[in-house]
Image (cartoon, grey):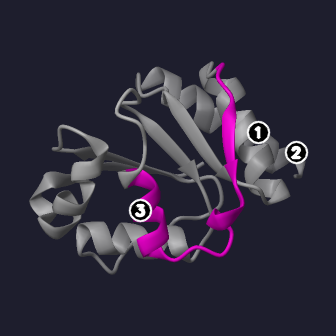
Amino acid sequence: MDELGTDDALRMGELIKDKDIVPCLIISSTAIRAKKTAELVAKGCGYEDDIVLDDSIYQAKPKDYLHKVETVSDRHNIVLIVGHNPTIEETIQMLTDSSDVAMPSCALAHFSLQIEKWSDFSKAKIKQSLVVLNDIVQP
């Protein structure tokens, strides 16, 4: 990762901390750049737990990302997934019913989900009113 990418990832972590949305769980692709991004974001926001590395994220489709969310333990109320385009953009488009989503490297999409437990996420993705895109922040 070049110096600009390193700075961007640290800055995004600091932004997460400033917005008071520090994750309880970070799940990252095992790809070198994604893993490094997750580590730097974690450092920037003060996340101190282990980063869960998941090799299935690299080749994932939107439905796979959504399934990851559904299987998260309910003890985690804020989750960060570090993945890859075009799947990230496609997943956001699916959740928001918007075709105008751009996620450059190190961008952050912040959602609120009107659900009680992660396994209810399948209902939320069907009823898009339960999924609120709060912000997309780019470095």
Indicate whether residue 55 is drawn in magenta: yes
Callout 2 amino acid: Glu
Q: Which residue is mark 1?
A: 7
Q: Earlier in the sequence, mark 1 or mark 3?
A: 1
Label 3, residues with CA under 10 Å away: few <14, some 14-19, many ≥20: some
Looking at the rendering, which quadrant does residue 92 occupy? bottom left
Q: Residue at x 24, y 40 (%)?
A: 117
Q: Residue at x 11, y 65 (%)?
A: 127
Callout 1 amino acid: Asp
Q: Which residue is mark 2?
A: 3
Looking at the rendering, which quadrant does residue 83 occupy? bottom right
Numbered circle sitting on residue 117? none
Find the distance from the CA under tag 2 to the CA under tag 1: 6 Å
Provide the secondary structure element on which disc 1 rests.
Answer: helix
Q: Residue furthest bottom?
A: 99
Callout 3 amino acid: His
Left or right, 112 with respect to 87, comes to: left
Left or right, 91 with respect to 29, comes to: left
Q: Which residue is mark 3?
A: 67
Q: Tell me whether the residue at label 2 lies in contact with that at label 1, contact meaning CB atoms closer than 8 angstroms.
A: yes
Whole-percent x, y for residue 66 in the image: 40, 63
Between disc 2 and disc 3, the foreground one is: 3
In the rendered image, the vertical position of residue 75 relative to residue 39, given as above or below: above
- How many marks the image carries: the answer is 3
Whole-percent x, y for residue 32 in the image: 84, 56
Provide the secondary structure element on which disc 3 rests.
Answer: helix
In the rendered image, the vertical position of residue 116 relative to residue 90, given as above or below: above
* Of residues 137 and 128, the one drawn nearer to the viewer in this rendering: 128
In the rendered image, the vertical position of residue 57 relative to residue 13, given as above or below: below
